[in-house]
Image (tube, rainbow, N blue to C red):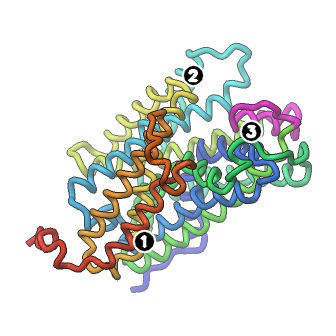
Amino acid sequence: MKQTLKLTDIIAVGFMLFAFFLGAGNIIFPPLAGQLAGDNLMPAMGGFLLTAVGLPLVTIIAIAVAGGSWGHLTKDLPKQAATLMAVLIFIIIGPAFAAPRTGLVAYEMAVKPFFIDATQFHLTTFSILFFAIAMFFAWSQGKLIDVIGKVLTPLLFIGLIVLAAAVFLDPQGDIIAAQGEYLTHPLQKGFLEGYNTMDMFGSLMFGVLIVDALRSKGITEQSATAKYLIGAACIAAAGLTFVYVSLFYLGATSSVVAAGADNGGVVLSHYVQALFGPYGQLVLSVIVLLACLTTAIGLISACSDYFSSLTSLSYKKWVLIIGVACAVVANIGLAQLISLSVPVLFALYPVTVALVALTFIRQRLPNPRFAYRLVLSVSLLFALIDAAKVAGVDVSFFNFLPLFEVGMGWVLPTLTAIIAVFFIGKSASQTLANEAA
């Protein structure tokens, strides 16, 4: 029997994936990037879209091609290595960085402005309430499409359309000259700025979550699952592109209303207040709260689903553990959280890119097991060097590497390794080939 979904369910699945992606980083990074990019807006935005939209879309497609799960995606790696990589990514995207950031951004942009003298007590109270609500919605896995895709996301999208229309119809300033690194290499700078959304990591989690959601709707066949997964990814990518283009243009025309801003949240807040007057903060609060809440729900649900498959603890117990952990971590502050996460992102993003690239060429590799181990090892080694540089370690010895100056020294070595494995026959790694024998 052919397995199909109703059009409303297809759109709801796409909206759910879009809402999972559209969270804290997606809102706070583009406005400042747009302001700093200035008249180099187009190349900077193009680079950002490559990592913040292109890579997550390709990753979702890779999951569909591989078979719909992390296990399928990493079947050519040693099981322990694949599990360790997954655990690290789930911790980073979950309770360590991305999920707590949703609560922090929601507080900083949607709640704090309403208090004349906000204190740590306000942040703590809000964190508890925010993640309690996220845990409530994440509690029932099978209802995520109905709750998020059909209710929360449409409300969020209406708010974003109103904001985008206002930005393009009534820009609050002229586009000025590019600043800093956006002046010399805007494309590469935009590319690296897209790392901060963490959406490529998110796609590894959300892709599996969408597969589970499709199963709850009766879609179990591989071909049907892949078709609807890719369809959802395209809907989400279109939505994200719409949001990023709007926010980049907002930032590029914000030099008057948000001069001297040191983060995208400030840029966005000042701009929205200039557009909508006294109601501006209310409009922004609704958009930010919905965006951050839907992402927090997705992150908590995906992490709980994965860790419950590794341990004897149930999904609901993991929801409680991860939700509480997120509320605790959220109290260390937004600036500190971002500064801690950047070196980790520089270390793991290239490995994830290499893993996804190998998925698409796996059928042509003479020895997939050897190829995966070699390429991912090379990408990790050079990514760690890039991460050390970002963390302030002196690694100037590697300045000879192409793109190393702009934080992408991993690219050429990884590409070289991918090309090299095509010329390595099965006999070169017979031991690895016989490992499962």
Query: In which quadrant of the rendered image does the N terminus lie?
Result: bottom left
Q: Which residue is mark 3?
A: 284
Q: Nearer the viewer, residue 288 or 54?
A: 54
Q: Earlier in the sequence, mark 2 or mark 3?
A: 2
Q: Residue furthest left?
A: 437
Left or right, 407 with respect to 354, comes to right
Nearer the observer: mark 2 or 1; the answer is 1
Q: Amino acid at mark 1?
A: Ala
Task: Measure how far apart labels 2 and 1 are at the Cα level.
Answer: 40 Å
Q: Which residue is mark 2?
A: 123
Q: Which residues are magenta?
A: 256-281
Residue at the spot x=35%, y=35% of the render? 321
Task: Measure how far apart labels 3 and 1 are at the Cα level.
Answer: 35 Å
Viewer can see residue 63:
no
x, y (%) of residue 179? 76, 42
Q: Which residue is mark 1?
A: 64
- The picture quadrant where one finds residue 360 is bottom left
